Amino acid sequence: EVQLVQSGAEVKKPGESLKISCKGSGYSFTSYWIGWVRQMPGKGLEWMGIIYPGDSDTRYSPSFQGQVTISADKSISTAYLQWSSLKASDTAMYYCVRCMLTLEFDYWGQGTLVTVSS
Amino acid sequence: QSVLTQPPSVSGAPGQRVTISCTGSSSNIGAGYDVHWYQQLPGTAPKLLIYGNSNRPSGVPDRFSGSKSGTSASLAITGLQAEDEADYYCQSYDSSLSGPNVVFGGGTKLTVL
């Protein structure tokens, strides 16, 4: 059974750094793109970027380029989303997704709620 | 403002048929890129409902169907049930000058009356 299991909720202060994770299982982790999707409170879905764990090829949405870093450790089948300096506007639910070649997201993690508040 | 435009809300009575539109442009749906649909039940992660414009993943009831024409796509739900009450999102790919991008519609809240 394909599963994407994300790390737990985080509460951080503005300016702090953060790295959240997404562990894949039940499939060949290095053979599928993994992406990240943001959902701000009460809002819609926004695609942030994707990574191919097989060779770490990474693509970012123009809206998130330079704002976050996506990485992966294929040895432990885990992808990451990282911020160097959080802002209050980063408060959101973040989902990792498995991405098919035709760009549909066929499996979703349970989500990681990130709250940034002073 | 989303690149793909969906109605904010639709509603229908149990048993009825509802449709949700997703309007794009020549740089996304009109360029031939596939449209996918997701269902997000309250408090849960989204779930893939339709992929490749009109294909249903295993386990999705055939009450859900998708279509695409020109610069628009539609999701139809027949035999509406209370459990269908959720947010629905369309998704495609956009190749505009700002850079290649996966894009979502703003979402449509379906209310079952």
Image (cartoon, coloured by chain):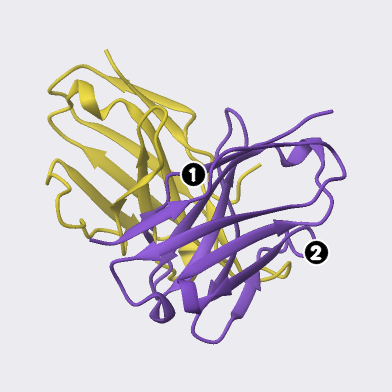
Chain colours: A purple, B yellow
Residue B76 image-quadrant placement: top left
Q: Residue at x 30, y 44 (%)?
A: B75
At a point 84% along the width and 28% down the height, the residue shown is A118
Position of B82 with respect to A83 (left or right) is left
Q: Going by the picture, which residue comes out furthest to the bottom? A: A55
Q: Which mark is residue A85?
A: none
Indicate which label's residue lies in the foreground, 1 or 2.
1
Up the image or down, A13 lies above or below A106; here it is above
x then y, percent, for residue B25: 55, 58
Instruction: Residue type at mark 1: give it.
Output: Gly
- Name the element at disc 2: loop
Same chain assignment for discs 1 and 2? yes
Q: Residue furthest top?
A: B113
- Horizontal side of B98 relative to B17 (left or right) equals right
Q: CA distance from mark 1 to mark 2?
A: 22 Å
Q: Nearer the viewer, residue B64 or B96?
A: B64
- Chain for mark 2? A
- Residue under the point 43% across and 80% down: A30
Chain designation of label 1: A
Q: Position of residue B62 (x, y in %)?
A: 12, 46
Given the image, on which type of amino acid does mark 2 rest?
Answer: Gly
Residue tagged by mark 1?
A111
Q: Percent from the top left, x then y, of residue A93? A: 57, 40
Badge 1 marks a residue whose secondary structure is loop
Residue A70 rendering spot, x and y as whole percentages: 65, 66
Residue A2: quadrant of the picture? bottom left
Task: Please tell me how many numbered marks the rendered image carries.
Answer: 2
Q: Quadrant of residue A77?
A: bottom left
- Residue A66, numbered label: 2
Residue contact between numbered discs 1 and 2, judged by CB atoms under 8 Å = no
